[in-house]
Amino acid sequence: MSADRPVSGSIHFMPAAAATSEVRCDACGTPFELRYAFQQVAVRSESYRVCSQACRASVLEPARSAERASARGPVRIAVLNQKGGTGKTTTAVNLAAGLADAGRRVLLIDTDAQGHVAVSLGVRGEKTLYHVLVEEAEPARVAVPLTEHLHVITSSSTLASAEIYLARMNEGRDRILRSRLASATQYDYVILDCGPSLSVLNMNALTYADELLVPVSCDFLSLVGVRQILKTVKHVNELLLHPVRVLGVLPTFYDQRNRISDESVKTLESHFGDRVLPPIRVNTRLKEAPSHGQTIFQYAPDSRGAADYRRVVRWVLERTENGARQRHGEEARA
Ligand SMILES: Nc1ncnc2c1ncn2[C@@H]1O[C@H](COP(=O)(O)OP(=O)(O)O)[C@@H](O)[C@H]1O
Ligand SMILES: [Mg+2]
């Protein structure tokens, strides 16, 4: 385990150092003299030496966030819209990568048999979501660690057979994903990239998720589709007895030169109020990034696409962490 990534666990404070001596800070690497109690931190059985309060916080934060996460489980967000080509995969991939860059532990799952997540990130999982659903493979073993914080469960055309497997079940077919992912508690966020249909797989995604993020492209027909999404959410809440709610609606393919773009955002705001996120502008870099197997933050960090998705990441963090999440839960029950 690396020094700046302590495991979760109870946090103890060491007594003050008896004598001063020069050591290297475990967080930033700067040599310093051990003088104060706060400069020694123990997280579970590991001890760390830190030069400042800021370094101390950076050592403690991952452990605290892990403790919070294990207490309440990951935030589960399905990126869903029954319409194809609205920016679902682009949003799922870049949101997951952005949250991981912000230090959160993220599991990104492709629930679409088209397998676009794997292509977009240039990964090939030996096993896929098919193995988790049908063969009951352990999600943590199937997930490919792309970075320390971003793990991915990919899909491929074999998922179509998983769909048939699920459809043939007499009972509980909508709950299989939920039960298979029950052990994936080590993550702060699980992001599901959904396919464009109302398939049994998407019903599974909805039954697993607590929150929906709905990318809607800024054109007239997409707005018509939004009504369909609200119906689906109502249906899931009534029939599956599972409280999933719309966390946010993300206008995509926003083009300032087009009047329909502004009109679309206004229409969405009239339905969803402050749950409408700042829009994602049309950006060629976003279109190019998947063919390089890279996220927008890797491929073109200074692009408009990267700036727009950074805003999405911040927005999601603000709406889902700590008190915000609890308040949302209360709203959903109200
Ligand atoms: N803001 C954007 N600007 C330009 N191209 C985009 C943008 N968002 C997505 N794309 C491209 O549009 C296509 C459809 O997007 P995608 O995320 O795959 O949609 P979905 O998953 O909903 O089918 C892809 O080729 C993608 O690279
Ligand atoms: Mg897609």
Image (cartoon, rainbow, N blue to C red):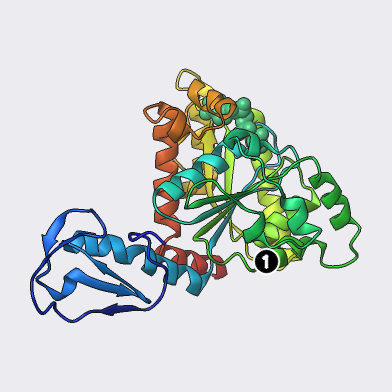
Amino acid beneath label 1? His
Question: Residue 308 at x, y = what percent?
Answer: 42, 34
* Quarter containing the C terminus: bottom right
300 versus 145 height, above or below: above
Res. 86 visible in picture: no
Report the residue at 11% width, 73% height from top: 36
Give left or right: position of 78 versus 172.
left
Report the residue at 53% width, 68% height from top: 73
295 versus 74 height, above or below: above
Give left or right: position of 286 versus 34.
right
Task: Determine the secondary structure under disc 1.
Answer: loop
In depth, the one of 19 and 124 nearer the eye is 19
In depth, the one of 3 and 230 nearer the eye is 3
Res. 15 visible in picture: yes
199 versus 286 height, above or below: below
Report the residue at 72% width, 40% height from top: 196
Question: Residue 235 at x, y = what percent?
Answer: 73, 58
174 versus 81 height, above or below: below
Q: Residue 166 appears in which quarter of the rendering? A: bottom right
Q: Residue 17 appears in which quarter of the rendering? A: bottom left
Question: Residue 80 at x, y = what percent?
Answer: 64, 46
User: Mark 1 = which residue?
Assistant: 242
* Mark 1 surroundings within 10 Å by alpha-carbon count, few (fewer than 14), some (14 through 19), many (20 or more): some
